Amino acid sequence: MRDQMKRHRAKLLAGGVLSVAVIGWGVTSCSHDDHERCVDTRDNTVIPDQYCQDTSTTTSYAHWYRGGSGFKMGSRVSGGETGEHGVVRGGFGGHGGHGGHGG
Amino acid sequence: MRRLQSRPRDGWQKAVESQGLVFPTTTLDDGSVVPYWHEAAYYALTMAEVDALEETTEELHVMCLAAAEHIVAHDRFADLGITDPAVIRAVRESWAQQPPTLYSRFDLRYDGDDGRGAKLLEYNADTPTMLLESAICQWYWLQDTHPELDQWNSLHERLVEAWQRMRVRLSHGPVHFVYAESDETGEDFMTSAYVAETAEQAGLTPIQLPIEQVGWNAAAKWFVDLDQTRMRTVFKLYPWEWLTVEDFGPPAIQTLDRTQWIEPIWKMLLSNKALLAVLWELFPGHPNLLPAYLDGPRELTDYVAKPLLGREGASIQIVTGGERFEQPGEYGEEGYVYQAFSPLPSFPGRDGGGRAVLGSWLVAGNPAGLGIRESDGLVTDTYARFVPHVIDG
């Protein structure tokens, strides 16, 4: 017989922490980034997303912007962070979830 | 292995939910609700059985690696339905480099004798789920109901240890955990959240996000998360055969040297059911394999036709006694493997009993624990239930 103790488990387990994460399911699972918007960095105003999704150029005035204030089209943003230009999303996930329970 | 009846704990549903299981019950097509986490029964294995099953798991994994090597060395990719030259090249390079792998799970048919005769049904080597139930829920169940007994279950510790060992081979920065947001069961989110937690306990910084929200910065040629943070290491609960054909598939393949994916792309070789036929070709008559072929059932009169990339038993066809049973599903275009039909053993019980399939886990290539699912019918499908186990004797 092999060492039976090797199958014993330490008492430190994860349920409490995980439950916090999983209780958040339903909130985070639909966590599309509603706060990210495309901004014209010349005047820090919100512009249509298509300008930020343009991947044909490496330099552009259009950058994604997160946090802070100013969300409506044409409004001025402040207090947030400017991200990178040319980021496209939605290129993964077309097949949906991968199954039912326990597969 | 015996199946024993057990009185469910008071508040069992809340207990497993508090441990993170988001679907303790299953709603059937007729609207009735049955437990997914089923503790009105449990399985008892002897230590000798567990030792034998552990050895079988080790041996099968070594054989599977040999089969992967054979596929690469003999250019058998077409047998797996892999024809894209870019994907083939990426798999070859990944196999040669052997980047870190985290976990996988064999599904075994086992009739409960001496642990030696378990038969390989499939290898979930890319995106296995049923992890939280196996690692956490059944361990707490054991503590609550049979604290004097043991369980074949070192999953959690081994996952944490695997991340710790892997750290030196990972890029600096956070590890991203991506899952399909459109999975309404919550299973993908739950599983990736649990794996993320094991990474965090290993000292890594996990960031979880839906795979649908992954961004591609074409100018910089890297993937970014919702904060525009570059994604250097990604744990994905999303199959490679899907990743590679979606819009971001080409850039993902072109930048495998910039983003480390876990599981690595070479796992496509093991998660494809053509593996069963390659194994039978390389190890004919092996006691833990069932005859399997790619070009038809050959001499088999009773067989199962399994789609090469099928999931949850969908689209499989069982031919036995001259009759044909077919599971609904949308898989099969990619081809089938024909495996000898060996019905799952039925274990009786006052609650009706069930047909059990063993999920034998590996972490970093080493046996790590057991999860048992039961079904009422011949196929372990999405309505199967999880039944805990003990080591007793």
Image (cartoon, coloured by chain):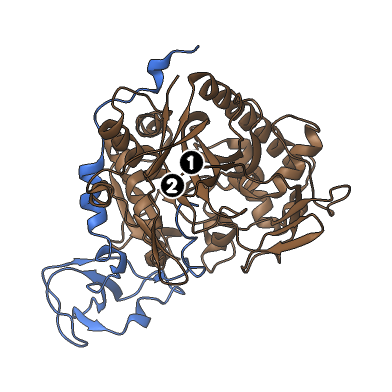
Residue B269 at x, y percent in the picture: 65, 46
The chain coloured brown is: B
Disc on res. B386: 2
Q: Is residue B135 above or below residue B181?
A: above
Q: Which residue is mark 1?
A: B372
Residue B179 at x, y percent in the picture: 40, 58
Q: Residue at x 74, y 42 (%)?
A: B71
Q: Residue at x 54, y 43 (%)?
A: B356
Q: Residue at x 26, y 43 (%)?
A: B9
Which amino acid type corresponds to the residue marked 1 in the rendered image? Ile
Q: Same chain, marks 1 and 2?
A: yes
Residue at the far front: name it: B350
Q: Are marks 1 and 2 in contact (CB under 8 Å)?
A: yes
How crowded pointer 2 is (Cα within 10 Å; few <14, some 14-19, many 20+) is rated as many
In the rendered structure, the answer to whether residue B309 lies left or right of residue B19 reads: right
Q: Secondary structure at mark 1?
A: strand
Q: Does residue B102 appear in this view?
A: no
Q: Which quarter of the rendered picture does the C terminus of chain B lie within?
A: top left
Chain A is shown in which shade?
blue
Q: Secondary structure at mark 2?
A: strand
Q: Does residue B70 appear in this view?
A: yes
Residue B365 at x, y percent in the picture: 53, 31
